[in-house]
Amino acid sequence: MKQYIKRHDHDKVAVALVPLAKGFELADGTVLIEDIELGHKIALCDIKKGEAIIKYDNLIGYATSDIKRGEHVHTHNIKTSLGDNNEYTYTPVDYVDELVGEEYFEGYLREDGKAGVRNEIWIIPTVGCVNSVVKKMEQEAQKFVGGSLEEIVAFNHPYGCSQMGDDQENTREILADLIKHPNAGGVLVVGLGCENSNIGEIKKHLGEYDEKHIKFMICQEHEDEVEYGLQILEELSEYVKSFKREKLPTSKLVIGLKCGGSDGLSGISANPTVGRFSDIMIARGGTTILTEVPEMFGAEQLLMNRAINEEVFDKTVALINNFKDYFRSNHQTIYENPSPGNKKGGISTLEDKSNGCVQKSGASRVIDVLEYGDTVKKPGLNLLSAPGNDLVASTALAAAGAQIILFTTGRGTPFASPVPTIKISSNSTLYNRKKNWIDFNAGELVDDENTDLQQMGEKLYKLVMETASGKKVRSEEEGYHDLAIFKKGVTL
């Protein structure tokens, strides 16, 4: 079993893959002068105060004091190198597109040509006032589940009224995107009747829609809203049961890429595994989406250099700068990151976190950049504007068209999203302890010297294809479903 890793020849630090005791000697002769925890960094040379600290062959901060070879490198002796403003230049990287041809999964082909990996009925409230009503409908409608109708789910949220400006538009856009999501074979939209984001407003954001697929009801217009809703759900269930799984190409798959509760191994095992998967999926005709913009800060130039052209480069620059402006407009520190859990796991600065985070995007070219609430239009690797918050970002990925989300974690979390969310552990300890949360163990990459990144990427690809064809993930087995919308402004 590997005990530590140096990611690149130019790196000044290595990362402990197991807890290492004081006195342990590395292959290059470095002797530890203190105990080093799993996921934490070891100085491979003497580093002077103010000197750059290199990991992933990139700058992750500056030393705040002299650091001796074999010493622990962490928040007590490293600080961020990042400032508020950056100048970016487009230095495109040469690529040879890897195209191996489409493969197939068993999914549900919808009337609009999109593919679902689930055949569910979604009950979506336009406003938080009817959350209890839709939950009651969900409970009483389970008797309709059967045949190819896999589940009936209500998605609660607290918004839809007392919102202004962008907040209100965000709510309407995300709800409209989810209403038209292909994983839902049928949708019941439930309004109260007096809310700002009422059904009439939501319809404006929907555009054309199939009336067999999407139904509406306003609670204030019916004596018994639950009884009326159940009548609609029974009708919808018969329509949804008409869909059957069929052979569909990978070009119809859109996979969201997200991380949370990261540790010092996330950028070494789980995120690179997802990155290799992303390249494999794109080579086979599919699409992936990378989000959580604040966790690109410090590694954004790597993504910018992979833009397919200057237009996409400019959109990527705007993606980063607009999010920095959002922080400033709320009088918040741009680089208030990483979290306490990240630090405990061995991540020291935002650059440390970001350089590990962006590895989920693999090495493919960036094809397009999406605003929050936009949906995917171009196959390949897309960037999406959304915050780092796990639930908000995962909902944004689903709304953008992702039928499945890959979520890497070093700390673990039970959360779900509107679509199947595959949890990928960065370490085997987490996988073995929380098998009710975790679907895939990327810790094998560091545990087994005979396992390489290509093997792990192919193994994850196989799991994704199985999931797309109906295999349930852990959160689905537990019955978890979550939805969160990005709130940026005033509540009336």
Image: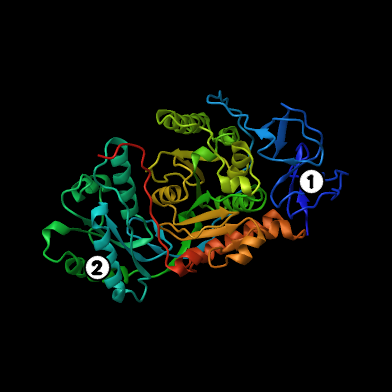
Q: How many marks on residues?
A: 2
Is 312 placed above or below 220 here? above
Q: Along the line of sight, which residue is nearer the eye, 169 or 317? A: 169
Inspect this view and state whether residue 421 appears: yes
Q: CA distance from mark 2 to mark 1?
A: 63 Å
Judged by depth in the image, the label closer to the viewer, 2 or 1, is 1
Percent x, y for residue 375?
Answer: 39, 46
**Kind of residue at badge 2:** Leu
Percent x, y for residue 362?
Answer: 61, 46
**Kind of residue at badge 1:** Glu
Q: Quadrant of residue 277?
A: bottom right
Residue highlighted by disc 1: 34
Q: Quadrant of residue 71?
A: top right
Q: Secondary structure at mark 2?
A: helix
Residue 456 image label: none
Residue highlighted by disc 2: 233
Percent x, y for residue 357?
Answer: 58, 44
